[in-house]
Image: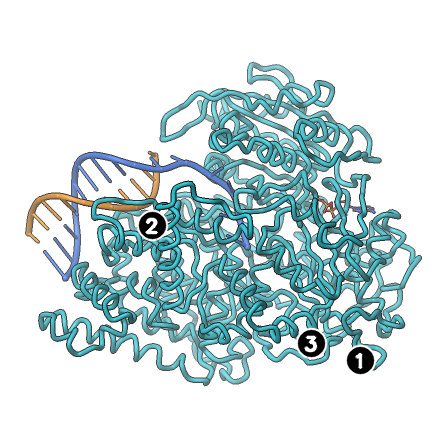
Chain colours: A cyan, B blue, C orange
Amino acid sequence: MGSVVLFGPRGRGSVPARVAARVALRVGARRADPPRHQRRQRPHPRVHRPIRHAAPLRRATGQHPDHRDEVFPVDRGVAGPGPMAGGDPIEPRFGPVRQGLGRPRGAGRHPAARPGGPGFPEGQRAVQPPVSRRTFLHGTTVRAGAVARRHGAPGSAAGRSSPLTGGMRRGDCAPGMAFDLGSLNPQQREAVVTHQGPVLILAGAGTGKTRTLTCRIAHMIQRGIAPGHLLAVTFTNKAAREMAERVREMLPTRDRKKNRARDRAEPEDPFLQRPTLCTFHSLCVRVLRQHIEKLGYKRNFVIYDEGDQVAAMKKILSSISAKGEKTDASAVLAMLSKFRNSGPNSPVFGDESVRALAEHVSKRYESALRAANAVDFDDLILLTLRLFREHPDALESCRRRWPHVMVDEYQDTNSAQFELVHALTKDSRNLCVVGDDDQSIYGWRGAEIANILDLEKHFPEVKVIKLEQNYRSTNLILKAANAVIRNNPRRRGKNLWSAKGDGDRIVLHAFATDEEEAQTVVDNIEFDRAGRRVGWGSQAILFRTNLQSRTLETALRKAHVRYHLIGGQSFFDRREIRDFLAYLKTFVNPDDDVALLRIANTPARGLSDVTMERLLAFSAERKTSVFAVMRHTDVLASFQERTRDAIRGFVAFIERIREPILLPERISLTQWADAWLRETRYLDDLRRMEKDPETADGRVRNVCEMVADLDGGPRRAAVAAARRPPARSIAVEAGLVEAPVPVAAAEAPAPIESRPEYDGSPMDRLNDFLEDLTLDSEREEKEEAGDAVTLITMHAAKGLEFPHVHIVGVEDGLIPHARSKLEGTMDEERRLFYVAITRAQETLRITHCGSRKKYGQLLPCHPSPFLKELPEECIQHAGDGSGDPVGAGKGEDFFAAMRAAVED
DNA sequence: GGGTGGGAAGTTTTT
DNA sequence: CTTCCCACCC
Ligand SMILES: Nc1ncnc2c1ncn2[C@@H]1O[C@H](COP(=O)(O)OP(=O)(O)OP(=O)(O)O)[C@@H](O)[C@H]1O
């Protein structure tokens, strides 16, 4: 593992999209069917990952330098041992501080100063965020449905200075103001300067909790605590990156060493290390990569995503249940997850036989994963706990490594995560957690509000800090949010206030259909942009379910509005992506049955359902992997000659392809994958199976981009692709890049030895790649996708803020969700609505419709009961489409008229 | 062993 | 409306 700020996601280019698959390996329809082709499964018609189709433009517009400058390790300044657990540093020993930066206190601040702006200290420019503004502009592309993306040239007008940009940022601190304590209110300051002992910041939305935490990190470093000793756990990888960025801006930059993709050697000296900012899961991966052999796993374990989990579970269920009987594997997994995560007060299964069955299934599942040297999301936490329990030395080394622990969004931690935190901090007592019980929205995932409300039980001496000033929203928005959340029982009341004025009223808007709703939201956005110079980037559309984004996307695309969809699990659900990843996993570890079964006969190579089923039976009987039994001579002998040859050929293929990745020599993984993909003719198969040539192209391109990503991530991918031999490159074939002109082709590629993207052994790099994808699927190449509207679920919006927010589909059955009524989780739904409202800084529009397309059928719906909880004086009803003047001005009418004119 | 068509089923939120 | 599964064809 490298010395990285964000591990899990390495500091390299990274890979977008998210994992979570319903599509799984078809193991398990009655005993265990091997994978089969899914037919007629087309890629999502919507362009979910616009990025994925942008490659051609990428090259055309040129690359931008990788500006990923490092801040840490920071200047060590005074030599001396780092503070040990519990010991406070003696003196500020932060190194030579650049003028105007990092002044311990009282430094003047210019909130308006942005990078490059006037009054900005020399040298600071370089710290501004990498200018890789890639945006997608719909409708400018070559082919329908595809999306082009451009990135502004470094420093171009697309940059921050543009009045048309804006958007989410959190814990914001303009560079230069550093963590000037004067910019904090007294309560925040107290949290920031309290470095020792447990601290709990329990405060409402927008009160600066995250910012306080960020400043605390910077302050601790400035006061001489070794950066390497700090651990801050965030809820998402994105949040971790943002926090790292903020901390970076607050501290002087010194060592400008290039952040190499795989700088595995971490300096011993904690002063030279960087603080650890990541999610619980990334943290555990990091710990486990180091220690997991103690638990009997191999170091190169893979992490199963949801699709893999379902596949594994199906296999088990079908083997134990009567044929024809089908149990919902994902439901079983959900139950299992709850059961495993919910600590001592685990739910009791009413029925004894159910309980026994659950235990049995759970055991089988665990051993299946272990046999495949795989762990799932829950395992990451649970195995780490087990490691700590069974190997005190490992625990001890982690405690020494991170004597200071911080957790953001603490209200959403589950029991296992609490235990983890507790294990780390029980002795040092240096724990700072931050959260808001009103924003606990992950109960369905095992989150325990009790973790935050009962922190005193475990840390009686905790210093509780309350923040009451909201810095985010105008008063009417805040008032409405408070009024809504007040309807929840059992909460810690808060008195939020804001110094911002009343601001605009919340605009409430009803529509007949969801399409109208989407259209009007887009109209409003365009009106704001044209008439008020409000950039797309400062607009966000929030919805309850991922499905709802479709209608919105269609409307946005039609209007040529750039947008940025967060979440939505399509990319990695695609068949070709899952296949490709299964191939990689198989090469990493052929004993991974789930992966192997998926690709064994994809493309068809004579290993039919029946054959694979028989092999699976053999493997169960002999308690070994499918791959292993494929090499047992007696097993082979039991097959017909043709099948036998097919099996032998497959085994030989796997062994031959994985050979180079078992060696330490650095290689180009892109070329490697390119070679075996061509050998298997997988892409041809893909194309053949697809009726529509355009979707086929899309699929092939997706795979090609993955292949290109293997070497150093997307940013370098285009370069790498362009350098490949023109004639045979699959990238060229796929139209991923244009065939390089002869001159470029003649240019000798830099030797592999000197290219940082090849650092590390192939096996390690593959593991990193898979890990990034599984853990941080959300990741964009660079957080700022340029000026684009954000489409996001209410859940994923937690912690973010936007000047202008649209909440759509606020209807009974969506929020609160129909299911939550059955489950009795109305309170959580209300919190979710509260979270959504409190994302808005300046304006908020809430919409709902009278009917909504569902199953392709228009179904009636009714306004959410939560709407009645909004105080009348905070809201304003917009016209219902009948021509009344509406909230945002005449925008809607204007556009509606225009549209009508155009469409006729 | 491989490919096709028809019918059924299902839709919360995510590391 | 979309995706998954099964039964039936070649
Ligand atoms: N003392 C302060 N002075 C000025 N602005 C502040 C101050 N504290 C926080 N802010 C600003 O308030 C906004 C909200 O801060 P932040 O995101 O840290 O709040 P939060 O409590 O973590 O919110 P949430 O509960 O929604 O996650 C940010 O834009 C931040 O820059």
Q: Residue at x 88, y 72 (%)?
A: A90
Q: Position of residue A605 (x, y in %)?
A: 20, 66
Residue designated by label 3: A257
Q: Residue at x 51, y 64 (%)?
A: A383
What whole-number distance in Å separates the C-alpha atoms at marks 1 and 2? Answer: 59 Å
Q: Is residue A279 visible?
A: yes
Q: Chain of mark 3?
A: A
Residue designated by label 2: A695
> Is disc 3 placed on a helix, strand or loop?
loop
Q: Position of residue A877 (x, y in %)?
A: 64, 18
Look at the picture and state if A113 lies above or below A121: above
Q: Amino acid at mark 1?
A: Pro
In the rendered structure, the answer to whether residue A583 lies left or right of residue A629 reads right
> Is disc 2 placed on a helix, strand or loop?
helix
> Dividing the image into 4 quarters, which one contains the C terminus of chain A?
top left
Q: Are marks 2 and 3 in contact (CB under 8 Å)?
A: no
Marked residue nearer the N-terminal end (3 or 1): 1
The residue nearer to you, when weighing A446 against A256, is: A446
Q: Residues within 10 Å of mark 1 (few under 14, many from 20)?
A: few
Residue A81, numbered circle? 1
What whole-number distance in Å separates the C-alpha atoms at marks 3 and 1? Answer: 24 Å
> Is disc 1 placed on a helix, strand or loop?
loop
Q: Amino acid at mark 2?
A: Thr
Q: Are marks 1 and 2 in contact (CB under 8 Å)?
A: no
Q: Residues within 10 Å of mark 3 (few under 14, many from 20)?
A: few
Q: Residues within 10 Å of mark 2 (few under 14, many from 20)?
A: some
The residue nearer to you, when weighing A530 against A491, is: A491
| In the rendered image, residues at marks 1 and 2 fall on the same chain | yes
